[in-house]
Image (cartoon, rainbow, N blue to C red):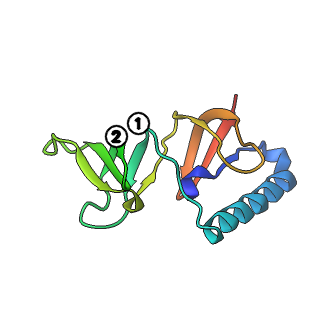
Amino acid sequence: MFQDTIRKRHNQNDNDASSDDDEQIEMVIKKTLMHGGSTDYAKGDKIQVNRGDLTGIKGTVVAIEEGGLITFKPTGYPELTKPLQIDITMVAKYFEPGDLVRVTEAKYKGETGVVIDVEGQKVSLILD
């Protein structure tokens, strides 16, 4: 959920505008959570398991099954050679610097850009 809310990085001189944007982002996050917002997943998305026995394992989505199951190929674990399947509610998207993304919520919805920084669950990017 939080990863889908992406903010634009501002120049140092835009402190006031940045503060306003941060407040808008917080409002979008709260509204999304209150209305049961969900994340859309697609083949090729990077995910991280955040609940259950597989917590912390990252991977790439291979398929999305009806009934709320995601099949993903684990990354960074040579011993895990076969795709794993997990309930969609137990994972979240994650981003790394250099990823190309499309903003899905708030003021910059529909814009594309490159991730330049990730701090916790906030992602900063430079818009194209």
Residue 75 visible from this viewpoint: no
Q: Quadrant for the N terminus, please.
A: bottom right
Q: Is residue 68 above or below residue 124?
A: below
The single residue placed furthest to the front in the displayed view is: 66
Check disc 2 and report the residue beneath it.
Answer: 63
Q: Is residue 77 above or below residue 111?
A: below
Name the residue rendered at 72%, 58% in the picture. 25
**Distance CA(mark 1)–CA(mark 2):** 6 Å
Q: Is residue 119 above or below residue 74?
A: below
The residue nearer to you, when weighing 62 against 126, is 62
Determine whether label 1 and label 2 are within 8 Å by CB. Answer: yes
Q: Is residue 120 left or right of residue 15?
A: left
Q: Quadrant for the C terminus, please.
A: top right
The single residue placed furthest to the top in the displayed view is: 128
Residue 103 found in image quarter: top right
Q: Position of residue 19 (x, y in %)?
A: 80, 58
- The mark that comes first in sequence, 1 or 2, is 1
Q: Is residue 3 left or right of residue 61?
A: right
Name the residue rendered at 77%, 62% in the picture. 23
